[in-house]
Image (cartoon, rainbow, N blue to C red):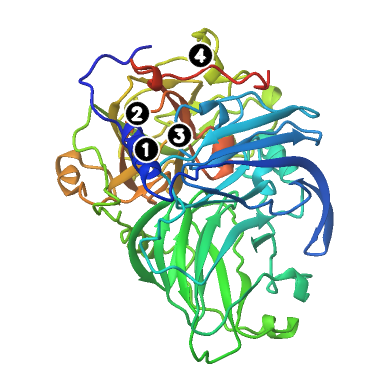
Amino acid sequence: MAGGRRPRRLSPACLFLAAAVALLAMPGLAAARTRRYTFNVTMATVTRLCVTKSIPTVNGRFPGPKVVVREGDRLVVQVHNNINSNVTFHWHGVRQLRSGWADGPSYITQCPIRPGQSYAYDFRIVGQRGTLWWHAHFSWLRATLYGPLVILPPRGVPYPFPKPDREAPLMLGEWFNADPEAVIKQALRTGGGPNVSDAYTFNGLPGPTYNCSAAAGDAFRLRVRPGRTYMLRLVNAALNDELFFAVANHTLTVVGADASYVKPFAATTLVISPGQTMDVLLAAAASPPAPAFAIVVAPYTNTVGTFDNTTAVAALEYAPQGAAALRSLPAPALPLYNDTGAVANFSAKFRSLASARYPARVPRSVDRRFFFAVGLGADPCRSRVNGTCQGPNGTRFAASMNNVSFTMPKTSLLQAHYQRRYGGVLMANFPAAPPVLFNYTGAPPNNTFVTHGTRVVPLGFNTTVEVVLQDTSILGAESHPVHLHGYDFFVVGQGFGNYDAANDTARYNLVDPVQRNTVSVPTAGWVAIRFIADNPGIWIMHCHLDVHLSWGLAMAWLVNDGPLPNQKLPPPPSDIPKC
């Protein structure tokens, strides 16, 4: 499965390592440490919206504990699975340079941790700083198994913006009164769409806009002092919803995204997709006109199905407020739930710093180009085999890239790759373009059925890759937040309608494109990304709407070893779980 020979060049991985060595040589910066955490996965009783139920938690907390490291640190997280379900953990956005065994997606880089078993995730943080997060990567367990991952700069290295007076992680999530595992199992059994969540949450709290949630203890409160500056480390941990975010009477300054710094820009409303993170500065008023202001989230979607069309409220407090006061906080005006124009305008503002200290190492040339049509589709009804058929026109919902719906294997793809035992596990023939050309954002084709398989794209080490992700209108055009494991990528272009290589390529930004690990394919539009395949292993790329992942909207890259010892995938750790 070698990807062919090509001229050798310095990869971002080498550049990251060189930068790390240079940093360690500087006075006061040789303090990289091993930071250890223990995750005990247990069931805990939690009450939200007057519903008391038992949920999976880490160390009995919902959301889970904050993990804090510095760039260059080694992180070791010992996981003990004490629930009656398999589990894995993904360190979302961590590059995992030659540590793919710690990436965490079940059946991709590891077999799940079975009940009663343990596994130690062991990896280093190289060339990244800012906000990431961790979450379960098995079925829909991440509904409650998630928490922030804060990467601080090395000691003595300042932020490239004024240091805030305080920092606060803010996890945006979804709450289901039902068991999320039961929700997705029912959807897969019926072939229809899943039941939607009952509330959005701030750090696990739904706030006063929901029934049975008006008590003061059920609302998140951010206490601030006049004249101080606060950095909000925002994470969208919701299962299936992109979110608008705003703070009444306050303008936010975006300074980071997905653990990369960006050129600061001001915004009154943010859009954050599942999987994405943002670091934003909030300047508290020197003389606030009121003692408290509403922090709100509400969904952005163009789905033709149902969605959680509610608004959640938290409080920005200059002075403590009672429960009644929280219910009457004036909310900021948000765009309509389907305002794709507002989303596009916000997304267009992101730019890398592209400075001498923080250069944008975007590939200028490309070895391999791919065009992926991304969207929903259908499976024919075979009710005797797989349940009922409550999808469109008596079919069953499916999702695909290039009409291939990803079939989750029964063993670890990375282990199969390491052992070079591919037979019966995967096929290295994922298509580089859709099998049938059509008007992707126009009238859908007559045949909406998908194919199924565990198919990957093999890449030679150091291959420069461009992928155009094209939304389709099959069963309705909608935005798809696509996450690439093991890599950051540069967003070099995006637009509406069908991608036109002859004209759109000429408008690419190859100077200061934003660097991300999760990007939303615009509704009825396209986005182009570039990365260098300098990290050996198998890396899944998937929609971060969990319902779409459950329906198969995923594929995987198989990146072969390089010629040098430090360009090869090391052996698996001795405690790697077995299938």
The residues tagged by marks 1 and 3 sit, at their Cα atoms, a distance apart of: 21 Å
Question: On the picture, is 447 further left or further right than 64?
Answer: left
Sooner in the amino-acid sequence: mark 3 or mark 2: 3
- Residue at point 30%, 40% (across, down): 439
Sooner in the amino-acid sequence: mark 1 or mark 3: 1
Amino acid under disc 1: Val
Image spot of residue 493 (x, y percent):
26, 48
Q: Marks 4 and 2: CB-CB under 8 Å? A: no
Q: Marks 1 and 3: CB-CB under 8 Å? A: no
Sooner in the amino-acid sequence: mark 1 or mark 4: 1
Determine which residue is flagged by label 1: 21
Amino acid under disc 4: Tyr
Query: Is disc 3 placed on a helix, strand or loop?
Result: loop
Disc number at residue 533? 2
Q: Quadrant of the C terminus?
A: top right
Question: On the picture, is 512 further left or further right than 191?
Answer: left
Disc number at residue 418? 4
- Residue at point 37%, 44% (across, down): 23
Amino acid under disc 3: Gly
Amino acid under disc 2: Ala
Question: On the picture, is 200 further left or further right than 371?
Answer: right
The residues tagged by marks 4 and 2 sit, at their Cα atoms, a distance apart of: 17 Å
Determine which residue is flagged by label 3: 486
Sooner in the amino-acid sequence: mark 3 or mark 4: 4
